[in-house]
Structures are given as C-alpha cells and as structure tokens.
Image (cartoon, rainbow, N blue to C red):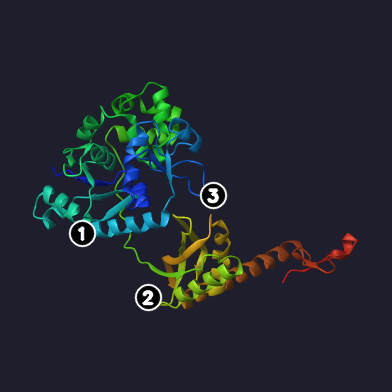
Amino acid sequence: MFVSLVVCTLFPRFALTVAVGDREELLRAPAALAPEPGRRERIGDVSLAAEAFGVRAGMPLGEALARCPTLALVPPDPAGVADAWERVLVRLESIGAAVEPERPGLACFAADGLVRLHGGALDHVLAAARRAIGRPVRIGVGPSRFCALAAATRARPRRPQVVLGDARAARDYLAPLPVALLRGRAETAALPEALGRLGIATLGELAALPAEAVADRFGDAGLLAHALARGQDGPLRAREAPERIEEELELPEALSGVQLDRALGLLVDRLLARRERRGRTLRAAVLAATLVEGGTWREQVPFREPLADATRMRLALAPRLALLPAPAERLRLAAVRFGPPAGGQRALLDEAAAARRARRRERVRQVRAAAGPDAALRVLAVDPDSRVPERRAILTPFE
C-alpha cells in the first residue's frame, strides 16, 4: 500500500536572518528581533547565542533582557520577510509542488505526484527542492506534517531526515522527542510549558495519556496535540496561485500629515490605473513602509466590501498611516486579493439592495394587514435641538 509523504522545508530564524541582512556578525552574538511597534512587548526570533542564555522567541522583552543583559535588539523587517518568503514559495512551486506555507520559514508540500516528475525517486525530489531554493535549508519527510516538521528540526542542511511508513511509524519516531516541538504549530504553541509543569516531557508520554483526560485539561488544543503526538494530522491545504500588483513611492524624510495622505492618494491612483488589474475590485491591500531609522513596517488592510473607488480606498487606508512608528523614506502599496469586476460588482449590489427593499415592503404590508395601518411607523427628526423632547421627533408612516 502506498503511503503519502509530506516534505517540510525549515529555515531556522528566518525573520532574524532577513532583518540582519549583511550584518552576519549579529547572528554569532546574543541577538533577537525587537518587538514590532504597536504590538505586544515580546521578542521575535533569537540567535543561537541568545538561546544559550535561556532566551526564546515570544518571551517578554523585560524577561529576555534580564536573562541576557547584552542582548542586541534588531529592528524587525516584516516587509522584507514577506518579500523574501514569497520568493522562496515561488521557487518551490516552480518544481511543481503545491505548497502550504505555515509561517515565514516553514512550508510543507506533498511528495505525491512529484516522484515521477523528478526521476522516480524521493531523493531526486528533495534535490530539486534544494536547488530551487538556492540557500541552506533543513528538509524533513514524514507521513504527516507534524512528523515532517519534527524530522526537519533534526535534519542538517545537506542531510534530510526521512521517516517512512504510516501513522504508527510516525508515532514511534515522535515518541522520544520533547513536547517543545508543539511550539511549531500556532494552535498548540502554549501547551509545552503547561505540559512541563505536569511532568510530561516527551511526545510519547503525551500520546500515552487518555484522550478524554487531555481534552478535559486542555480543550481542543490538547486534543490536537494528542493527535499530533500519535502521528495523526490534517490534510495539506495548498495555497492558491498568488497574484500581486504594487506601487512604490520614495518620500522626503520630513513628509507627514497632509503630505503623507497625498502620497498615499497618489499610490492608490497609480495602483487602480495598472493594466494588470483588468477592471477588478480589490478585497485586500498591503501598506508597507521603509523606516528612516532602519527596519520596515507592514500592515494588511482587508476591505469590508470589494473596492475600486479611489476615495473609499483612501478613507480605508489613511488611518493606518497613524500607526507608522517612525518617519518613512519609502511607501509601498500592494493589492493582494482581488474581487469581481467593478461593473459586475455594482450590479450585484444594486440587485441585492432592490431585493432588500422588496422584502421590507412586503413585511410592512403584512404587519399593517395584521395590526392596522398605524402598526408600521418610522421616527422622523424634526427639531433635534429643541428643549422639549416631544418636538425633537415625530412618528410617520413607514414607506
């Protein structure tokens, strides 16, 4: 019987590596990503030297500095991380892989269908992925996503870890590994600390517990962790083919206030005028900035309804400019999700509004038929500033 295999590609400290750039000496010293402005005061990725002091990602900033007073804080670069990670995903997709990105630095794809495409052997698939990425990467293979992730954490850049078999083989492989691996999944990231206080150190010990007891203590997250420890996991959810258009504008250093709003308006006009948009509406946009003091800022803005109107887009995006933590030297606007064509969308909205009006008229007619002509009334403001409450508004028939 053929067993499906999942390939996991892992880039340790991906966000820190991108933020450091060519200052590689920081990776050899205690360093960590500084908290993003406006977010919780918790550090990001940490270097190996910082881990030796007990500092780990997600730790409060004060606690991290108390453990390692010489800790160097690197300004975060969320825009650079997003761009670098997108390039990695596109390279993986170039070999035919349907990729599921877990987070920047961690992606999985199924080996099914790629074996024949790349010479009939799993080793050829892994070699093709390594060549396409073009940078050191840890690769793990297993019957499930979590097992493949665990294998990738134990792999070396040129020596992938491969676990062959079914869920039982995955459970046997995971049994001696620490529960700290659960931090690799967002749903179970908070469990290792609580499990450690209960004396559960390995995934094998977790898998041996009754599922009912785990669910009673930890809820849905505990049930998921229990299933992962037993070699069970959900199916892969490959991302859709991305389509992205963007505009960028270099700013004078002192640009702020109304001038910054005008710069945003210029970017919106340029973005809507791009031929690649093909008359479609936008469902979400990403506003990013390169900061004068170093680092970047990035904010994704979903629209409540698909937009193709420049004025409404500026109204939705302008408040986000107040979140800029420092003066910006470059502003960028990208469309990341598209909706239907603007004309078709307006027609749909008009049809929906007409249907709502028709349903409202029918409800009013039924109410009046059952309770009399004065049953459905509406409040009409006449003199809102009057001192007499009875003069401020009157009741009129609802039409």
Q: Closer to us: mark 2 or mark 3?
A: 3
Query: Mark 3 belongs to which amino acid?
Result: Gly
Above/below status of 222 relative to 119:
above
Q: Residues within 10 Å of mark 3 (few under 14, many from 20)?
A: few
Horizontal side of 398 relative to 148 (left or right) equals right
Classify 356 as above or below 2.
below
Helix or strand or loop: what does disc 3 sit on?
loop
- For residue 96, the mark is 1
Farthest residue to the right: give it: 388
Characterize the local packing of mark 2: few (<14), some (14-19) or many (20 or more) Cα atoms within 10 angstroms.
Answer: few
**Mark seen at residue 276:** 2
Assess disc 1: are there few (<14), some (14-19) or many (≥20) residues with their C-alpha within 10 Å of its C-alpha: some
Q: Earlier in the sequence, mark 3 or mark 1?
A: 3
Counting residues from the start of the chain, the first of labels 1 and 2 encountered is 1
Q: CA distance from mark 1 to mark 2?
A: 25 Å
Residue 263 falls left or right of residue 116:
right
Can see residue 81? yes
In this image, 265 relative to 364: left or right? left
The amino acid type, in three-letter code, at marker 2 is: Glu
Q: In the depicted view, which residue is nearer to us: 271 or 199?
A: 271
Q: What residue does disc 3 label?
A: 38
Q: Nearer the viewer, mark 3 or mark 1?
A: 3
User: Which residue is found at the position 25% from the left and 46% from the top?
Assistant: 8
Calculate the distance from the C-alpha at mark 2 to the C-alpha at mark 3. 34 Å
Q: Quadrant of residue 187?
A: top left
| Residue 369 on image: x %, y % | 71, 65
Q: Earlier in the sequence, mark 2 or mark 3?
A: 3
Question: Please, what secondary structure does the residue beneath circle 2 have?
Answer: helix
- Where does residue 28 sit, x and y in percent of width and height? 31, 40
